[in-house]
Amino acid sequence: MTSRKVLPLLLLAGLAPAQALATNGYFSHGYGTINQGMAGAGTALAQDSIAAATNPAGMAFVGDRFDIGAELFSPHREYAVQGGGEPQPGALYLMPGSRKSENRAFLIPHAGYNRQVTETQTLGVSVFANGGMNTEYSGRDMGTFFAGKAGVNLEQAFIAPTWTWRFAERHAIGISPVIAYQRFSATGLSSLAGFSSDPAALSDNGTDDAWGYGLQLGWQGQLTDTLRGGLSLRKVLKMEEFDDYRGIFAEQGDFDIPQMFHAGLAWSGIEDHWLLLDVQHIRYSEIASVGNPFASPGRLGDDDGAGFGWDDMTVVKLGWQWQQTTQQAWRAGVSYGEQPIPDSEVLFNILAPGVQQWHVTGGFTASSPAG
């Protein structure tokens, strides 16, 4: 496909951020069809032009290619309240019972383009998305904590132009200056006005958006004839503030995207098979609006204001691939990441994503013969 056709498609994917719930906190367990089939493992083994989402150095090994696709995601979220008793006058409370969130189908796009510009260098771009904190409760007989229909929606898209340099025959480094876009809306939170530094910028203000930027660095290389390795670091993505919601997020609407690390190994000691091991670490606690506990001393929106109380998250991923033929491959994976939401932070996190600890994935891909 020519670059004249590729660039408009990449732009379209970048402007269609995911309205969805990711599951390693509010990040997807993987990016792109191949990576998701192995539970997100792939720091040491790149196979498509979405590779920069995990490790920008991987783009050095995928050659000239264009990829585009989409994920249909259907999360099911609910909360249950047990016990109860007569609520105290003026107190915020939730009624006993179970309630399910609406909005159960979301389309998440991804796209990538890569070109070998010299024998040792490539240029490309990966476009990917994730969402989180997408919840919507009907508001019927829910108690006084929410005011009518309540929920929040966060959408994020990332554009990662990538340069790689193969500094040795089987080793490369990659650099991606990441451009990020996110938008947010909240409804039904006006009952928290007395706890906010700016009640007018707390709830029901429509959708606010923000742009930001950051940097991701990576290395990928062949350690032995059958073993590959990879490392990647993405710095905090500095985002514009959500001014319309500066009364809910700590630091007057600040919602930076946390730092994360990837490390991985990929072993090919069995003919036509790959076994992958990845470790991902996400530093949620460093972002005040996410990491501050709900019982913080400040009001909602203050520098030391309430947040969602999330801990850092470490995810271990195992992946398997069988290249059955040149055009056909089978994949499977499993990952585990400890729940980032402490028991003490459950109340406010009713609004947050349906975080999963375990993922079990599988997939099959087939391509047309080159012609």
Image (tube, helix red, strand yellow):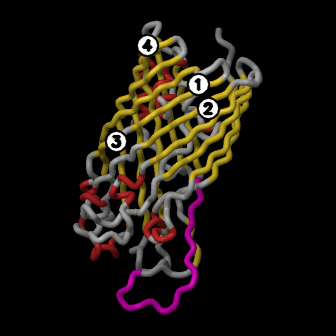
Q: Nearer the viewer, mark 4 or mark 1?
A: 4
Q: Which residue is mark 2?
A: 34
Which x, y percent locates residue 37?
65, 37
Q: Which residue is mark 3?
A: 237
Do labels 2 and 4 touch, CB within 8 Å? no
Residue 124 lies, with reference to residue 128, above or below; the image says above
Q: Residue placed at 67% from the left, 21% from the top? A: 226
Q: Nearer the viewer, residue 250 or 79?
A: 250
Tell me whether circle 2 and circle 1 mark residues in contact (CB < 8 Å). Answer: yes
Residue 321, position as x, y percentages in the image: 70, 30
Question: Residue under circle 4?
Answer: 121
- Among the two numbered marks 1 and 3 on one chain, the one whose residue lies closer to the N terminus: 1
Q: Amino acid at mark 2?
A: Ile
Please state the horizontal and vertical placement of residue 320, each as a whole percent of the image.
Answer: 70, 34
Question: What separation in Å lies between label 2 and label 1 (alpha carbons)?
Answer: 7 Å
Identify the mark at residue 11; answer none if there is no mark: none
Instruction: Determine the CA span between mark 4 and mark 1.
Output: 17 Å
Reply above or below: 346 against 357.
below
Is label 2 in a helix, a strand or a loop?
Answer: helix
**25 or 269: nearer the viewer:** 269
Task: Look at mark 1 in the image and give the residue it sits on.
Answer: 47
